[in-house]
Amino acid sequence: MSQHPGFTLRDAKPRDAETVHRLVTALAEYENLGHEVKASPQDFYGALATKRIRGLIAEADGEPIGFCLWYETFSTFTGRGGLWIEDVFVDPAHRRLGVGSAFFKEVAKRAVAEGHARVEWNVLDWNAPAIAFYRRIGAVGQDEWTDQRLAGDALHALAAQG
């Protein structure tokens, strides 16, 4: 656990599954994507218990105010692992306390300690405050890359092909 003025950070544990689910839902609502949340608290319990994801919970006065979840990747170009930050969210009432900076600093420290080459994540193109924050911490946008997704019916159709 690390102390910061006004909040603490601690590792997310399987017992935090309900909290993570609640915060993921809040993030999805903020991003106007609430309709896409299909995950259950049990899904987060399993992912945290098996370490498929790792995470941090930010707390103020013992109450969860934010979370950061990530998992390990591998870059064939660098020949080294990396960390992919899947989600970061800080409750709007607790923004400007430095929680986001603390999340990214902690993930960066872990990436360096574990020998990873980089930390990466996505941001919605309309989220100007987040993009400005990412530029302030030294992140560089990868404008020449576009994300692709195969899911739902298309995923199942491709998988069914001989």
Image (cartoon, helix red, strand yellow):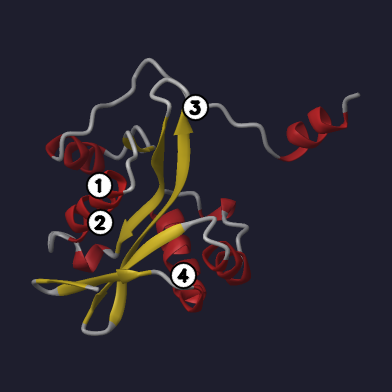
Q: Which element type, helix, strand or loop, lies under badge 3?
A: loop
Q: Which residue is most to the top?
A: 144
> Residue 95 sits in which quadrant?
bottom left
Q: Nearer the viewer, mark 1 or mark 2?
A: 1
Q: Quadrant of the N terminus?
A: bottom left
Q: Which element type, helix, strand or loop, lies under badge 2?
A: helix
Spatial separation of the CA atoms under disc 2 and disc 4: 18 Å
Residue pictured at 74% horizontal, 34% vertical: 155
Q: Nearer the viewer, mark 2 or mark 3?
A: 2
Q: Which element type, helix, strand or loop, lies under badge 1?
A: helix
Spatial separation of the CA atoms under disc 3 and disc 1: 23 Å
Residue 144 location in percent, x, y? 38, 15
Spatial separation of the CA atoms under disc 3 and disc 4: 26 Å
Residue type, mark 2 in image: Phe
Q: Nearer the viewer, mark 2 or mark 4?
A: 2
Q: Which residue is most to the left?
A: 5
Q: Mark 3 = which residue? A: 147
Q: Which residue is most to the right?
A: 162
Please report contact status of discs 3 and 4: CB closer than 8 Å, yes or no: no
Q: Which mark is residue 103?
A: 2
